[in-house]
Structures are given as structure tokens and as C-alpha cells.
Image (tube, rainbow, N blue to C red):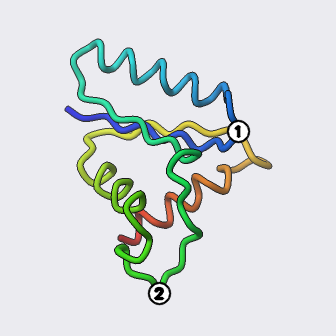
Amino acid sequence: MKVVGIGGTLREGSTSLGALRRALAASGEAGTDVELLDLNELKLPMYEPRKSLDEYGHNARRLVDAVSGADALLLSTAAYHGTLAPGLRRTRSTTCSS
């Protein structure tokens, strides 16, 4: 089983990213294959519907491949005016349309 965690907070030292790291560590200790994708490190561009996935670069392909190969996803982000933070919304757009 593979679990992919996506950290959607762009702030350094974020508590939600720390919580995600702990959850993935516990999952790994239980024998699960885990991968952390930190959006602050991936630096994904804004989503543009007319662009092909290859035009987004290596990190976008890495994100889509990781999500496609996952059995489970853990999403971690700070609340942003009652909804998902913009970085995580862009990630959703990129992965759902590829």
C-alpha cells in the first residue's frame, strides 16, 4: 500500500506540515510505503487548462505520477477563509485534469 501526503501550506515551519510528517511517519512504521510532497518545495506554476502536463515541468509530472500511483492521499493545509489554501487548490486542478 502506498500513501502520498501533500502539504499545502506555503509557510515555513507550518504546524499542518508537521502533523502531516507525523502521520506519514506512523503510516511508514506500520509498513506502508509513504511519500511526502511539500508544495512549498515543488513550486508548481498556476494551472492553465490549455497547457499539456509536459509544459508544466518535472515537479508537476512528479505530483501527478505520485497521486496516480497512491492507494491513499493525506492532504494537509491551513484553513484559508474557510476553504483550501490556494496552493492546494492549484494542486487539485493540476492532478484532476491530467
Q: Is residue 88 above or below residue 38?
A: below
Q: Residue at image x 66%, y 44%?
A: 10
Q: Quadrant of the N terminus?
A: top left
Disc 1, disc 2: CB below 8 Å?
no
Q: Position of residue 21 (x, y in %)?
A: 48, 24
Badge 2 crowding class, 10 Å Cα cut-off, few under 14, some 14 to 19, many 20 or more, is: few
Q: Position of residue 37 (x, y in %)?
A: 44, 42
Secondary structure at numbered mark 1: loop
- Under mark 1, the amino acid is Arg
Label 1 and label 2: CA atoms lie apart by: 29 Å
Q: Which residue is mark 1?
A: 11
Residue 38 is marked as none
Task: Specify which label sits upstream in the sequence, 1 or 2.
Answer: 1
Secondary structure at numbered mark 2: loop
Q: Is residue 32 above or below residue 41?
A: above
Residue 50 is marked as 2
